[in-house]
Image (spheres, coloured by chain):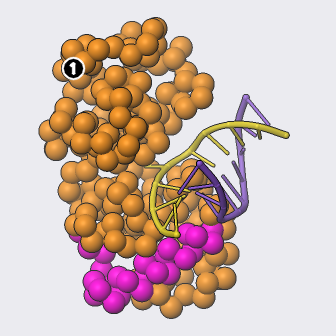
Chain colours: A orange, B purple, C yellow
Amino acid sequence: MYPDAHCELDFTSPLELLVATILSAQCTDKRVNQVTPGLFARYPAAADYAAADREELEGLIRSTGFYRSKANSIIGLGRKLCEEHGGEVPGDLDALVKLPGVGRKTANVVLGNAFGVPGLTVDTHFGRLVRRFGWTAETDPVKVEHAVGELFPPKDWTLLSHRLIWHGRRICHSRRPACGACPLAHWCPSFGEGPTDEADAAALVRNGPFS
DNA sequence: ATCCCGAGGG
DNA sequence: CCCTCTGGAT
């Protein structure tokens, strides 16, 4: 299912993807893609963010929401990249997570889509769906990441993340999931009654559309 | 636990 | 009017 699910943010470099992912917090990808062309043209390199005028940057990203904190993060990001990473985006999780505005989810997005390093991007969709599927009951994102990581080989992690997010965005919504339109309705333990036990969940992983 | 924050949908 | 949208820092 969803064999060609992919990152829907527009980008042409690790830096662009990193900035776009920061902007995508609590915002649709479509809107992020509306502001990034102008943003990337104005600030082509990390040094340009480091030297950016705060109010001008805020104006360019305002429509994505949380624009003051996002502008702060992006300016700090540019500075730290220049001071500690030669102006380049580091390709490892530990360094990425230390950058301002970059948490584990954002770091894994950059690793998976710009560096080809397998990563599970546990965002709100990912967590909600794997709990509905009965794959884990954890709510802490790191615990969810480890639990789901045990169920699939690393080579499948990035595509699996995109598939789950795709499905979450279009069908398995937070409040009113479109179970009537869901191709997984007869497979999903949350369609009928409540969650299944661990053996059932393991079988769902082995035989399910995401394997 | 709370704040940051605009835009679009129901 | 209320809710949600691929979070992260305090």
**Residue A194's image quarter?**
top left
- Secondary structure that dominates the magenta span: helix
Query: Compared with residue A73, is residue A150 higher up or lower down, i.e. above or below?
Result: above
Q: Residue at x 27, y 71 (%)?
A: A95
The chain carrying label 1 is A
On the question of residue A38 being in view, the answer is no
Residue bounds of the magenta highlight: A67-91
Regarding mark 1 in the picture, which secondary structure is present there? Answer: helix
Q: Position of residue A81 (x, y in %)?
A: 35, 82
Q: Amino acid at mark 1?
A: Ala
**Residue A21's image quarter?**
bottom left
Image quarter of the C terminus of chain A = top left
Q: Residue at x 37, y 73 (%)?
A: A99
Query: Compared with residue A82, is residue A120 higher up or lower down, i.e. above or below?
Result: above
Which is more toward the observer, A44 or C8? C8
Query: Compared with residue A158, is residue A101 higher up or lower down, i.e. above or below?
Result: below
Residue pointed to by mark 1: A202
On the question of residue A206 being in view, the answer is yes
In this image, A143 relative to A181: left or right? left
Q: Position of residue A155 (x, y in %)?
A: 16, 44
Query: Compared with residue B2, is residue C3 higher up or lower down, i.e. above or below?
Result: above
